[in-house]
Amino acid sequence: MRARLLLWPAVVALLVLVARWLAYALAPSPLARVLERSAGGPSLVLVTLVSLALAALVSVAVVWLAALGVRERARLAPERVAPSLRLRRLALRAVGLYLASCFAFAMFESYLHWRAGIGFHGLSCLVGPVHRNAIPLLAALALAAAALAEAVEHVLAWMRAVVRELRRRRLAPEPFISFAPLVSLAPSLVSVQRRSRAPPLAA
């Protein structure tokens, strides 16, 4: 539990850094901002569609590969119940990561602007001309990160089930082996005196 609490802030920080790098790489030059309609960089709609489409493809591929691997392993042991994907948890995580990363991005940029003497802008940094692409980029990265986390947890759940079953088999007592009587195993080997005889025939 402690490792998970430390992992998610690190994931949010990584999303912010990657989105910030991509947003500045896609930001148009000052001259392009003046001539935005004719010579600007990629439009916000184009960035949104492309980033979300790529994130959806990556997310579906990652989750499908994880589910396929667990399903193929489950066929080798039909008695073992395979874990199911929790898509609702994936969606909630994607939304949570998106909101947290947007807030962290705005606060980080506002701090940098304040240090540079520009002023503290708060959440308005997300809708500025420089950071206009950060919102779709953060959404795409949050979706991909949530899908990757769900895929990893799906595989780990199967591995934990296998480990529990192996431990249960190791700790289970060995069955007592009892030998059947000789009569039930091979009646023909029993002496003739112990066998039942028919009544004598009448003269």
Image: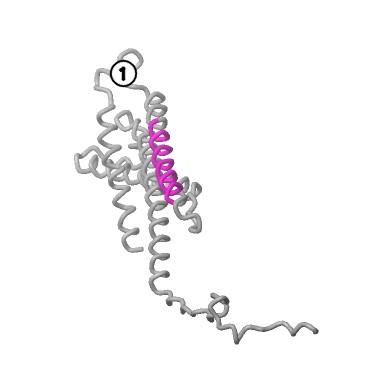
Per the image, label 1 sits on a secondary structure element best described as loop
Q: Residue at x 42, y 50 (%)?
A: 73
Is residue 133 one of those drawn in magenta? Answer: no
Give the quadrant of the N terminus.
bottom left
Res. 41 image quadrant: top left
* Image quarter hosting the C terminus: bottom right
* Residue 170 x, y percent position in the rendering: 38, 71
Magenta residue check for 68 = yes
Q: Nearer the viewer, residue 187 or 27?
A: 187
Residue nearer the viewer, 91 or 160: 160
Q: In the rendered view, would you say 72 is above or below 124?
A: below
In the image, which residues are magenta? 54-73
Asked if residue 52 lies left or right of residue 15, the reply is right
Q: Which residue in the protein does label 1 denote?
A: 40
Depth order, front residue of 142/104: 142
Residue 52 in sight here:
yes
Q: Residue furthest toward the bottom?
A: 193
Q: Is residue 63 above or below residue 7?
A: above
Task: Please identify the residue farthest to the top as the structure is shown.
Answer: 38
Q: Amino acid at mark 1?
A: Gly
How packed mark 1 is, by other alpha carbons closer than 10 Å (few <14, some 14-19, many 20 or more), is: some
* Nearer the observer, 194 or 147: 194
Q: Is residue 95 among what the camera can see? A: no
Quadrant of the rendered structure where residue 132 is? top left
